[in-house]
Amino acid sequence: MNLTKAVNTAHKIFAAAAMLLSLGASAAGQTRPLELADMFRVKRVSDPQISPDGKWVAYVVGVVDKDANRVNTDIWMIPIGGGEAKMLTNSPRHDRHPRWSPDSKQIVFESNRGGSFQIYTMAADGSGSKQLTTISTEATGAVWSPDGKNIAFVSAVYPEFSEKPFSESDALNKKKDEERENSKVKARIFTRLLYRHWDSWVDDKRQHIFLVPASGGHPKDLTPGDRDAVPTSSTFSAGDDFDISPDGKELAYTATPMPAREEAWSTNHDIYTLKIATGERKQLTSSPAADTYPRYSRDGKHIAYRAQARAGFEADRWQLMVLDRATGTAQSLTPKFDSNVDAMAWTLASNNLFFPSEEEGQVPIWTVSRRGSDERKIIEGGVNGDVCVSSNGKLLVFTRQTLMRAVEIYTASSDGKKLSQLTHVNDALFSEFRLSAPEFVWYTGAEGDRVQMWIIKPPGFDKSKKYPLVYWVHGGPQSAFMNSWSYRWNPELWAAQGYVIALPNPRGSIGFGQEFTDQISHDWGGKAYEDVMKGVAYMEALPYIDATRMAAAGASYGGYMMNWINGHSDKFRAIVCHDGVFNFHSMYGTTEEVWFDEWEHGIPWKTADFEKFSPHKFAANMKTPTLIIHSELDYRVPLTEGQQLFTTLQRNGVDSKFLYFPDEGHWVLKPQNSELWHKTIFEWLDLYLKK
C-alpha cells in the first residue's frame, strides 16, 4: 500500500472513531477517568461460534472474581441478528470453548467445575448438561465430528501407556500422576530438553488427540506415541490445531516430525492426516519450518494451513497454503502478501478464505480466493479476530477491540459491509469512562526509516500544560503495540494517572512488512535501540511533554530494552522492568524454547559476538532507579534474569525494588496479584515523576 495513502487512511479512521466515541461519551455522560478497580469490572468476551443453522452465536464471557483471585468464564448465546443474550452455564469455575453439534441442537464445552477439566455437553438452550469424559489426565479443546457421532479432544498423557486399551492406559496415567503427587521426593529426572514450557512442567507427557462417542463411552487415543499431536507452544498454534474432514473419516493435525531431542531448538511442525477407522497416518508436508492449523474446505477437496519458510525462525511470515487432497500438491495463496496470516475460515462454496492479519498497528480482516494472490481487505480499523463464517456463507462473526474499548462480538456481510456490534457486554460500564482517543503518528527512526507510534494523553488533557512521560517498549520482540484493549498493560489506565503514554513500534515489530520484522535479529541493541531513542526525542520535542520528568517501562523484550537503556542512557528518571532479559548466557541456558535464542543471537560457543548486546556487559553504567518485576513460574525469561539485575543494581548502589510473584508466569494474571502489580508500578512512577 502507498505509505502516504495508508497514513491518511489511518488518520481518517481514527478521527471518525474518536468522533463516534466522543458522541457516545456525551450521550452517556461520561464524567470520570478509568480507575484500577474498573479493570476488574470489565468482562472479557471471546470465542464466538456460529450455530450450523445460522441462528445463534455462542461465546464466552470471563468475569473477575477478585475474592477468589481468578477469572470465572461462562458460556452465553445470542441471536445472530441481535437481541437478548442468554447465559447458558453458571458454574463458579471455567466453562469455555463452546462448539456446536452439526444439527445445532447441542453444545460441547470444557469445564473444571468438578475440579479437573473434562468435556461436557448440553442442549442448545443450556439445559441437560452432562459430563462426557472422566479421563484422569483431563480433557480440553473438544470439537464435533461432522456426522455428530463423535467428539475429538486433547489430553496430555504419558506416551509409554498410549498404545494400551483406554481403561488400562488411563489407570496407569492416574497411578503415575498420584505417585508423583503423593511422593515426599519431589525430584525430577530429565533426559532431554523442553522439560518445562511457558509456566508448567511437561513431565514427559505428550498432547494427544482422543475420540469419544458423543453418546458416551471410552475415548480412543488417535495419536499414540512419543509425539505431540497439538503444538505445546502458542507461537505455532492459531486455535484448535486439528480438524475432522466433512465426511467424518479423516483427522488432520499438526505434529513434530523430528527426533524428540531436537524439539527445543527446532521449529519444525508438519501436517498429518489420520484415517479414523484404521489409524493409518500420512505426512502431508515436509518443510523444515513450521506448518500448522489445518482446515478442511467445506467440500472436502482441500486442506488450508499456515506455513513458514525459514526453519528455526518462529517470527517468520505465516503464509496461507492450500493443499489439493486428490493430487497432494500445495500452493501458497499469499506468496507476496507481506504480513502474517492468522487463523483462517473457509466460505460455504470453498472458493474463498477469510483471515485476520496485522497492518500498521491494526488487524483488519482479509479475504483471498482459492486461486491466490488476490488478497483484499474487507474489515478495517481496530484489532479483529476469531473469524467465523455462517453456514450460508453470507455473514461473518468476529471479535473486535480497540485501545479505547474491550472486546465485543461483531457481524458483517461477507463483503465486509453492514458492520454491526452484536454483543453489548461492556457498553454500560464503558459509558462511565472518560477515555483519551489514541494519536497515531510516524517519526523517523534508524537509517531514515519511518516508525509508527501511539500516543495516549491523560483524560482532560490541557495542551497549555506540561506532562510527565512514560515511554513503553513492547515484548516479543516480534510483536507490536496494536489498536487493542489490554487487561494487563493498559495505556488508558496509565494515562489516567496523569501521564502521557507513548507506545512505539520499532523495528522487530510485526505488521510493517517482514523485512522490518527481520531487522532486529542479532541486533537487539542496535537499530531497534536507535528507533526507540528517536521516538523518545520525538516525544521530548512536543510542547506538552516535560522532558525532565520521563520514565520508561517494558516487559520481556521490552524489559530487555529497559536494561539496555539503563546501560546506555540517563534520560529517564525511573525504569520499570518486567520479566526482562539481563544476561544472554544465562538466558540461553535456562529458557525452554532454545530455537528463539539461537535465531536471535546464535549459539554462545559458536557465535563470536554472542554477548555484544547483552545488558549485563554494561552493568557498570546502570544508574537509573529501577523497579524489577519477575515471577517464579516464568520459564520463558526465567527468574534468574531478574535476580541478577537486582543484585547488580543493589551492589552498585542504584535505587531499586524487586516485586516477586511465586505463583505467576511470564504474565501476571491473578486479579489480586494484578492489583499489587499496578499499585507498585504507579507508586514507583509517582515517586520519581510527581514528588
Image (spheres, rainbow, N blue to C red):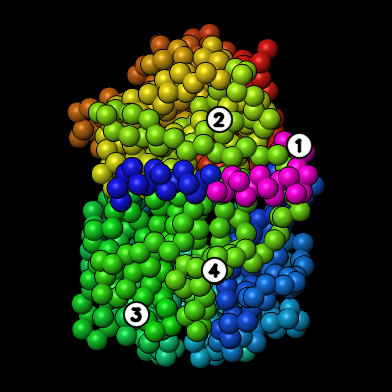
Residue 276 appears at what percent x and percent y? 41, 86
* CA–CA distance in space, label 4 to label 3: 22 Å
- Asked if residue 387 is among those painted magenta in the image, a careful observer would answer no
- Label 4 sits on residue: 418
Crowdedness of circle 4 by 10 Å Cα count: few (<14), some, many (20+)? Answer: few
- Asked if residue 35 is among those painted magenta in the image, a careful observer would answer yes
**Mark whose residue sits in front, 1 or 2:** 1
Please give the range of residues in magenta: 16-37
Residue shown at the point (52%, 33%) measured from the top left: 455
Dots 2 and 4: beta carbons under 8 Å? no
- Looking at the rendered structure, the kind of residue marked 2 is Ile
Residue shown at the point (63%, 75%) measured from the top left: 80
Say above or below: 52 vs 64.
Answer: below
Q: Is residue 676 left or right of residue 190?
A: right
- Looking at the rendered structure, the kind of residue marked 3 is Asn
- Label 2 sits on residue: 501
Sequence-earlier tag: 4 or 3: 3
Crowdedness of circle 1 by 10 Å Cα count: few (<14), some, many (20+)? Answer: some
Crowdedness of circle 3 by 10 Å Cα count: few (<14), some, many (20+)? Answer: some
Let me know if residue 36 appears in the view: no
- Label 1 sits on residue: 32
- Label 3 sits on residue: 351
